[in-house]
Image (cartoon, rainbow, N blue to C red):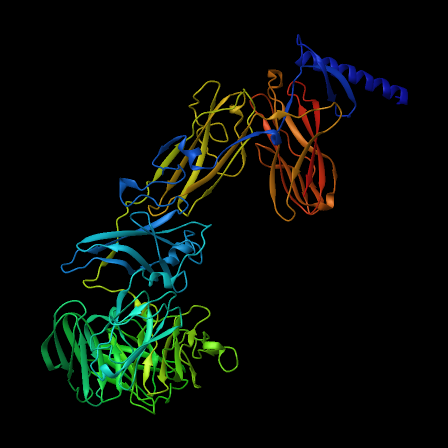
Amino acid sequence: MSDSPSSRTERAARRRRGFAAALTTALLVGAPVASALVAVRSHVRVDVPVRDPLIEFYDYATGAPVAWTSSTDFEAGTLVSLDASGDALVLAGGAGPPWWDADWTGRGCYTIDHAAPGASSVTEYPVRIELDTAALITGGEMLADGADLRAVSDTAVELPLWLEGPAGAADAEVWVQVDTVPAGGTAGFCLYWGNPSASPVSDAAAVFTYSTEKPLYVTVTDRNITATAFTVVSLVKGNRITNGISTSPTRNEGSSHTFPAGEQSAATVFSALGPVTSRGVGNGQDTLVPISWSATEFVVPTQRGTQRFSVHAPFADTNVVIFDGTALRAGPFTVPAGTTTSLDADVTGSNAGIVVSTVPVLLFHTAGSNDAFAVPPPSTDPLYGVRSTNAKVGFVATTSGVVTRSNGGTITFTGWPRGSAATSSGGGAQGGGPGDGFRIAADRPIVAVQQADGDGTESSVFLPERELGSAYYLPTGAEYLSVVCPETGITVRVDPPGGGPSGRPTDLVCAGPPGGPGWARHSAGVAAETWVYTPGGEPFYAYYEDDSYNGEANLLGLKQGRQYTWPEPAVTPAPDGGYAPAGTWESATLDTGDAGVFGTLAFTADMPPGTTVRVRVATAATDPPTVFVGPDGTAATWYDGAEQALAAVHDGDRYLRVRTELATGDPGVTPRLDDLTITHSLTRFVHDAGEPDVAAVTGTVGSAGRHWIARVRTSAPALAGSSATVSLDSVTGLSFLALAEISTTPPPAPAVRISSGVVVLSSGPPVAFDAASPHSIVLDEQITGPAAITVVWRLDAASSGTPVVERLLRIEVAP
C-alpha cells in the first residue's frame, strides 16, 4: 500500500475530524460554546467548541493576605488556656505570679522566706541560686550564652542579675538583687529564659551596688587600731564609703580613699554604696572583714606566737567559746551586739583553734605583732591559694581530701580529726614557685592559710571557689603579686595606673597541669590602685605583699561586698503550677468579601522540645464557619507551619476562621505562636491562546526556596476521572539552576526535576484531576542566577483516554 504525501495528509485530516466530533459528543452536548486551544498527541492543534471555563488556572501570587501578628490580633479571637496575647500557654491552676513577658517562653520561680524570729527588713538584697543552665541550653530552651536570662519580681519589676561564670553549667550560679525582703514575711521572683532575640543584661556590679550605703565591712581588731589609717579602693562606679565619722568623696573603680588614724575602733563598721578592697596601713593589719563572712564556727590552722582572737557580733548578743584542738581554751564569754571582744588564746602542738558562737560572728586573728588575717568560714568548696613558704589546713570534722598542685603533683590527706592542723612545707618564698598554686578539695569544711613567705611573718587565707572574683584592685603598693587560676592557660592582666613603666599592662599566664590549677607571679613592684583582672572574665585567686610593711594580704572582690543579714533569708524553688498541657486560640471570623479561591497558610512559632503548635481552618458560605479541617480537607490532619495550600474544600466559601492548638509535654516550657498568615481570593491567570501563562518569582542565590505557582481546578462534571500530567517544554538559564523541582500537590512527587544544570526528570506521572481532585503546581528551587522553565500541563479525558487540553506555564525565577 502506497503512502504518498497526499494520502498521509488525508488520513490526518480524517483523524482531526473524528477527534473533534468525539470531543464535542463526550463533553459539550447542549452547552454554550466558545473557542479554546485543544491538542492531540500528534501536537496538531485545532479549534473546537468547548465549555468556558473548562479548566481554571489561579495565580497564587495574587492572593490577598490576612495576618495575625500582634496581641491585638490574637485577643480579637477566643482564648482557652492561653495567655492574654493568645500566643503562649498559661500556668495551670493559677499558681505563681502573672507571666511577665510573652517573648520569654520558660521560667522558674523562687520564694524568699524571711520569717525567722529576729529578722530585719532589707532592701536591694543579693541572693544566690544554682540553675541547671546546661539542661536548658541543651534542650534548646535557653540561648547558648545565657543572654536571655532575666530576673523579675512578683510585682513585675525587672531585677539586677548576674550569671556568674560560663553559661552551660549544670550548677551555674545566678545572683539576683531583690528589691525588698520584708521581716517576718516572704518575697518572690522568677527567672525567665527562652527569648532568642534577647540581649544580655548580666551585670555583677549592678547586683552588688546599692542606692543607699549598706553596712558591708568591719575592722574587727584592737591591734594598734586607733593609730591605724585604712585605705579603701572602690570596685564599682559612683561609690561612697563611710566609717561613721567621715565619708569619702564619690569614688569610681580603682579610685582610693584613706580614712585617717584615730577614726577607727575595734568595731568600726564601714558602709558603702558598693564593694571595696582595703588594708590597714601598718604592721599587724589586714583587710577589713566582710560582714558576708559571718558564721557560727571557724577554724584557725596556726600555732604561731601569741595568738589573739578578735570576735565581732554584727547582729545580736552571742556566747563564744575557743578550743585548742578539741580542748576548751577560753570561754564561754559574751560578745554584745555591735561590739568586738579580743583575747589571747594560744593553740598548742599541731592543733588548730576552733571558735564557736551561738549566732553568726566575724573573726580576725593575729599572732605576735605582725601576723594578721581575716578568717573566712570553713567551706567544702575547693579552696585556692599559694603555698609560700608553708600551707596549713584546719579541720572542723574528720576530713579527707586531696591537694592538686600547679606542677601536676598531688598531696593526699586522710582522716584528719576535728581540731587538727596539717602543714605542707617546702614552698617557694615571695609568692611561691611553679608547684605552689594549690587547689584543696575536701569532703568536710576546711580553712587553709599561707604562712611565712621568707621576709616577714604575715599570713594570707585561701579562698573557696565561690568567693573568687574576676577583677581586683590593689589598695596599697606591692612587692609582688601571686595568682592561682582554677584552669590553666588563663591570662591575668596587671594594669597599673598610667599603664606601668612600659606604658602598657603586663600579662601573666596561669601555668599548670591540664585542668588546673595554674599559677603565676608578678615579682616586680606593683603600684597602688593597680587593676588585676582576667580579660576573659574567669575567676581567680590573688594575694600580694605590702611594700611598706612586708605583710601579705588577700585581694577581695565584688562578692565579698554583698549585703548580708541574719537571720539569713532562705531561698527555695516556688511551686509554679506548670503550664497548661494544651490551649487553643480561635480567631474571629474573617469576611473575605467574595466566594473566592483560597491560597496558602503559613505560621512561625517557637517550639521548645516537647511542645507543638498546629492549625486547622474552617470556612463556610455563611457566618460562622464551624467545621475545622487540615490540609487534606478532613479533621485528621493539621497545618504544621510550613507554607501549604489550603484544602480545596474551602474554595467558593466567603467566611473563614482559624483554630490554633498549643501543647506542651513539659510543664516548665510553653510554645509560642509568633504570626500566622493566610492568603485568599486568588485571581485567574490572564491567558492568551497559544501563549504561556507567566509566573514570576524571586529566589535567593545559594538558598533553597519554595514557591506556590498555580492552583488548577475545574467545575466540569464531564471531566470526572480524568488525569493530568506536567512535563518540561523548555528551559532557559539551565546552568543557573542548582535545583528545580516542579510538582503537583497532592501528590508531592516532582514531575520535572533539574539538578546541577541537568534535566534529571522531564515528565511526571498522570495524577487525578476532576472537580473533586484539584491540585496545585509548586516550585522548589535553588538558583545561582536567572532562569525560566516552561512546562506543559496536559489533561487526559477519562472518557476518551486522549489528550484533550494542553496549557503552557512559564515560571521565571530571578534573584
Location of residue 304 (image quadrant): bottom left
Residue at the farthest bottom position: 455
Q: From where the camera sits, is residue 45 visible?
A: yes
Q: Quadrant of the C terminus?
A: top right
Check the picture and name the quadrant holding the N terminus. Answer: top right
Residue ranking furthest to the top: 30
Residue drawn at (32%, 81%) of the image = 553
Pick the front one: 353 or 118:
118
How many marks can you see? 0
Rendered position, 513 above or below 612: below
Give residue 744's quadrant in the image.
top right
Rendered image quadrant of residue 510: bottom left
Q: Residue sitting at 72 percent across and 29 percent down?
A: 692
Q: Position of residue 584 (x, y in %)?
A: 38, 34
Q: Where is 167 relative to 55, above or below?
A: below
Q: Is residue 91 above or below residue 153?
A: above
User: For this rendering, which residue is in front, 82 or 614?
Assistant: 82
* Residue nearest the observer in this picture, 486 or 239: 239
Left or right of 690, for residue 262? left
Residue at 29 percent of width and 66 percent of height: 562
In the image, 701: left or right of 70? right
Residue furthest left as drawn: 332
List x then y, in percent, for residue 633.
49, 27
Task: Say whether residue 69 is left or right of residue 223.
Answer: right
Which x, y percent locates residue 575? 26, 49
Q: Position of residue 516 (x, y in %)?
A: 40, 76
Residue 418 seen: no
